[in-house]
Image (tube, rainbow, N blue to C red):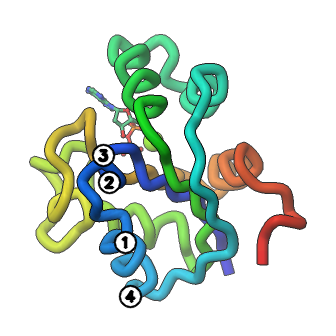
């Protein structure tokens, strides 16, 4: 078994499709081990996306991720990290494969509905950003 960190981003909640996205995730065989509804503070968003702090889009990314509530989820499945990246599709929805969550629901690279960890190592760090081990079922 492997775990990954998903975040349903503010646009998914604004568009009232967070339930649909969660159903996609369940239908794809992921088990939800932890889930929260919260609003990221600026500090928390900056820390979460620290690897991108030198990128030109960093400030916009932080502004977007703090613009409304988000739903972080700890998901479990064999090969969860790669399987979840496959389910969500490319960062830019224009390049995402048919049937992926970003292809179905995302409007742009800036507002792309969902986050997924990019490696098991980062997944562990990102899960710890939101969840204590004792929070997970
Ligand atoms: P991913 O979310 O697919 O892992 P990433 O880690 O490269 O993509 O980037 C994190 C987020 O930053 C991404 O979901 C949206 C935003 N982003 C990435 N590249 C961008 C770009 N060229 N312009 C604007 N926002 C971008
Ligand atoms: Mg990433």
Frontmost of labels 3 and 4 is: 3
- Return the x and y of residue 70 as percentages of the image width and height: 49, 48
Q: Which residue is mark 3?
A: 11
Residue at the spot of label 2: 12
Query: Which residue position is annotated with label 1?
Result: 19
3D distance between C-alphas at marks 2 and 3: 4 Å
Query: Is label 3 in contact with label 4 (beta carbons under 8 Å)?
Result: no
Q: Which residue is mark 4?
A: 27
Labels 1, 4: front one: 1
Which structural element holds mark 3?
Answer: helix
Residue 24 x/y as whole percent = 34, 78
Give the secondary structure at mark 4.
helix
Q: Decide which of 110, 15 is in the foreground and name it.
A: 15
Q: Is mark 2 within 8 Å of ligand 1?
A: no
Locate the C terminus by quadrant. Answer: bottom right
Are the residues at dot 2 and dot 3 in contact (C-beta closer than 8 Å)?
A: yes
| SS for dot 1 | helix
Query: How dense is the environment of label 3, judged by Cα within 10 Å: few (below 14), some, or many (20 and up)?
Result: many
Task: Please tell me which residue is depicted at 38% across the width and 53% down the height of the picture.
Answer: 114
């Amino acid at each position: 078994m492997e775990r990954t960190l998903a975040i349903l981003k503010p646009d998914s909640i604004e568009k009232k499709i967070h339930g649909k996205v969660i159903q996609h995730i369940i239908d794809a065989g992921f088990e939800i081990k932890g889930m929260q509804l919260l609003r990221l503070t600026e500090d928390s968003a900056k820390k979460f996306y620290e690897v991108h702090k030198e990128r030109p889009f960093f400030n916009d990314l932080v502004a977007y991720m703090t613009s409304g509530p988000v739903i972080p989820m700890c998901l479990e499945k064999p090969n969860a990290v790669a399987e979840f990246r496959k389910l969500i599709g490319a960062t830019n929805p224009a390049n995402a494969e048919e049937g992926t969550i970003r292809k179905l629901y995302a409007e742009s690279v800036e507002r792309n509905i969902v986050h997924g960890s990019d490696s098991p190592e980062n997944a562990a760090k990102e899960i710890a950003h939101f969840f204590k081990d004792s929070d997970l079922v």
